[in-house]
Amino acid sequence: MKCYLVCEQEKLYNDLMDLVRAYYPHIEPSPDGEPLVVDAWQEDCYRVQVRYVGRLWQDEQPFWDDGNDLLRQRHYKWFVKKTVYRALCEVCGVALPYGSLTGIRPTKLYYEMTVEGLDAHSMLADYFGVSGEKVALIEDIVAAQRGIYGVDIDAYDHFANVPVCPTRCAYCSFIAETYPKVKKQMADYTRNLSKGIESFFDLGVRRRAIYVGGGTPTCIPTDMLAQILAAFRHEGEEFTVEAGRPETITPEVVAVLAHAGVNRVSVNPQTFKDQTLRKIGRAHTVDDILRAYDLVAGKFDVNMDLIAMLPDETMDDFADSVARAVALRPQNITVHSLSVKRGSALALAGYDSAQNNALAEAMSAYAYATLKAAGYSPYYMYRQKNTEGRLENVGYTLAGKACVYNVDIMEETHSIYASGAGAISKRVYPEAGRIERLAEIKEVKGYNQRAEELLAKKKVFFAQ
């Protein structure tokens, strides 16, 4: 059952449609097929009319800004979304945890409102309709980012992507390819990626943090991994490698990471239930998780990922996974809300747990309370589309162990020099409030074929 949206303003339509989608499956279509109609305009103030199921909602609001057109358009969008959200709330009798917010980065919005001189707490709670629990989460994260956020903004972060995994997870449709599929291309990819990494030093800028992501970089042969890591010429800064698949973590891999100066790695259980691991296409077991953790504990700071709302998991299953992760005491634990991507095996099989948003919210609340009680603080977050319960992904950290790169990329405070298939470089212009992006081609084969062209474009991009 779907509600259809009519809004003639294209710049508003996509944001409003995200809000409407957030109400599936609560929303019922009008009996006579009437769509949700939004008419909004700006004259001497903001005005909006929302018509649905024979009802009319109207609102108006004075301009807040001092004539800045960008701010005026931003506030206009907030206002229209707020009014549509109020209408959907009344029709469905359901309030969403993040109210009318549909963006990826609620904490970035908090910072931006503070800079504007707005009371960010009141805006979240009273204007956008964010729940008290989620306002508290956002403010906990802002507090945890002190000393990291906005510090040393002239320094760059340095990223490389190895979009290769041992197998494809059932919920994933990311660009990562399985290693057997691209095995013959990996020698060329290693050479091209290493060259791309080394080109960073032509910029003559200071480096703040290094991050090697994927995919699972540790699933490629150790000689290739060593070549890629050596290209960074590590000089003591934060150096993270995603080693998320426990079955890829071996004594040989650990030796390569340590030799290169890596100081942060991931060991991602997703769940501590073997039956679920098989369902979601992971090639490891719970015993593999424990073995891998033993190999890296004490040598690196470790992050462990968990996912709420995995297929057929109960609250008890999720609570057990949280408890077992806490017992291991990694420096970071990241709790994701399941996001079933279009094109993933789960989506193609028709998997849909959206009917159980209450369970998703309960799992999120349980993780927050349990991890805080265990001494972990939430320190970054982001939201994805198609996430169960329209919730969030949250990184938790022990004191002094937050990942600088994660804060930088989520809050978009630092420029990022990125190399590899699917990588996105960013140039941040804080004074102008502008971010420019340059994306690499997504597939390993395409990256190899166009490596020189892509490198040339990146040199121009960063020379401007």
Image: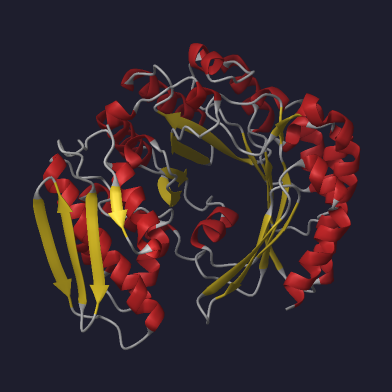
Q: Which residue does the image show at 56% across and 52% down from the upper left?
A: 403
Near-viewer residue (263 or 357): 357
| Left or right position of 330 against 26 | right
Q: Position of residue 27 (x, y in %)?
A: 21, 38
Q: Which residue does the image show at 85% across and 52% down from the upper left?
A: 450
Residue ranking furthest to the top: 275
Q: Position of residue 40 (x, y in %)?
A: 24, 67
Determine the image quadrant of residue 458. bottom right
Locate the N terminus by quadrant. top left
Q: Position of residue 73 (x, y in %)?
A: 35, 74
Image coloring type = secondary structure
| Left or right position of 162 against 18 | right
| Left or right position of 246 against 392 | right
Q: Which residue does the image show at 42% across and 28% down from the upper left?
A: 322
Image: 175 above or below 179:
below
Determine the image quadrant of residue 110. bottom left
Near-viewer residue (228 or 235): 228
For the question of whether residue 129 can be seen, the reply is: no
Locate the C terminus by quadrant. bottom right
Image: 148 above or below 216:
below
Q: Position of residue 38 (x, y in %)?
A: 24, 58
